[in-house]
Image (tube, rainbow, N blue to C red):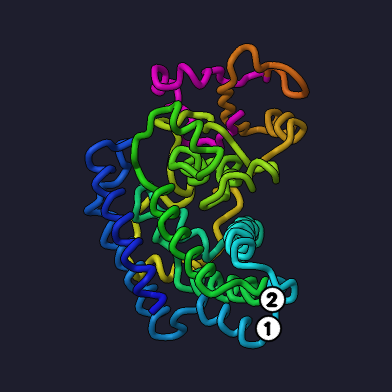
Amino acid sequence: MEMWIRFWPFLAVFSIMVTWEFISPRRILAQSRQERWPTNLGLTLLNVVLVWALVGAVAYMAATFAAKQQIGLLHWLSAPLWFAVPVTILVLDFALYIQHRLFHAFPLMWRVHQVHHADLGFDATTGLRFHPIEVFLSLSYKAVVIIALGAPAWAAVAFEIILNATSVFNHSNVSLPERLDRRLRWFLVTPDMHRIHHSTRAVETNANFGFSIPWWDRLCGTYRAEPALGQLGLEIGLSYYRDSFHLGQLLLLPFQARIPLEKTWKEISPLQLSEMLVEEAPPYVLDVREPDEFTGELGHIEGAHLIPVSDLDKRMNELAPCRSQTVVLV
């Protein structure tokens, strides 16, 4: 029953966002729908079938179990429904923010979560692209939170509907007026806000973790307003996977050999950068700061290629020499 209740709102939101993407796209996708959608939608269908066949309505069952056993914080407090419903939605949303950060923090969890980030495009189907292992881990985690909280059954189901809808919305390749986007970000994670999280730059990938409510990123210090290269200039995906995957390859991705460290994005300190610059084969340092940003610990860097982010679109030809070098972006 829960699955059907969640399905129709999801289908409505997905249809609206796909139509919106077609009418008013935010970016030109690196790969077309024809290249990406069979994999993304195939993975989605597989997850739906597996969840339906193996575990069913997890959120509803967990909440019903907590109610029958009268366990969980809200049951112990005898909280009224008007209080329990918003608390359930807020707590579950914050719990997923924490879950998302954990998937980025631990290598074994990242192996699974990278399936989501390996999409070279960013549209409504990206919000559905999760490995079955991640889906089952997430369902188990949410069930534990629902029982511990003593969440009302229909509040838990309402959260699942909201989560599905916002995941499709904030992954959509749609164009919103800048002023509207800025205002919405105080109440809702927007596509421009979440797109930054899908950047190939590690400092941007490790920002804007929220799915529905944007407050957690602001409160926990992981909010980033804009990408360094702008919304139209940022590169989507993972720097070490620049080819598309078919469904079978995507399912096997978490079990492949580790990515060599030198092929991954990582943060380095000014001292580390200074040491790298005197090596026999120094990196290509691309400094995209504006002139008024050369302050503090990291001032002018000797030998860096200075191209302010505002000029990047006009000077892309100057980046040709860096294709065979390690790149340090400042």
On the image, numbered disc 2 is attached to which residue?
75
Location of the N terminus by quadrant is bottom left
Residue at (58% x, 63% y) in the render: 85
Precedes in sequence: disc 1 or disc 2: 1
Q: Is residue 210 above or below residue 315?
A: below
Q: For mark 1, does the 10 Å Cα neighbourhood hold few (<14), some (14 to 19), or many (20 or more) residues?
A: some
- Mark 1 → mark 2, Cα distance in angstroms: 6 Å
Is residue 172 in the magenta section? no
Q: In which image quadrant can residue 94 be found?
A: bottom right
Q: Quadrant of residue 298?
A: top right
Q: Residue at x 59, y 59 (%)?
A: 86
Task: State which region is magenta.
Answer: 301-330
Above or below residue 324? Residue 241 is: below
Comparing 19 with 195, the one in front is 19
Q: Residue at x 70, y 73 (%)?
A: 78
Q: Considering the numbered disc 1 on the image, is that residue within a helix, a strand or a loop?
A: loop
Residue 319 image point, x, y percent: 45, 26
Quarter occupied by residue 313: top left
**Residue flagged by tag 2: what amino acid is it?**
His
Disc 1 vs disc 2: Cβ atoms closer than 8 Å? yes
- Residue 188 image offset from top left, x and y in percent: 51, 44
Res. 95 in view: no
Residue 274 appears anywhere in the view: yes
- Tell me, yes or no, whether the highlighted magenta stretch contains residue 325: yes
For the residue marked with disc 1, what is the amino acid?
Gln
Does residue 219 appear left or right of residue 177 in this picture? right
Query: Who's the residue at 31% across and 65% down the image?
Result: 8
Vertical placement of 257 versus 20: above or below? below
**Residue topped by disc 1:** 70
Q: Is residue 272 above or below residue 239?
A: above
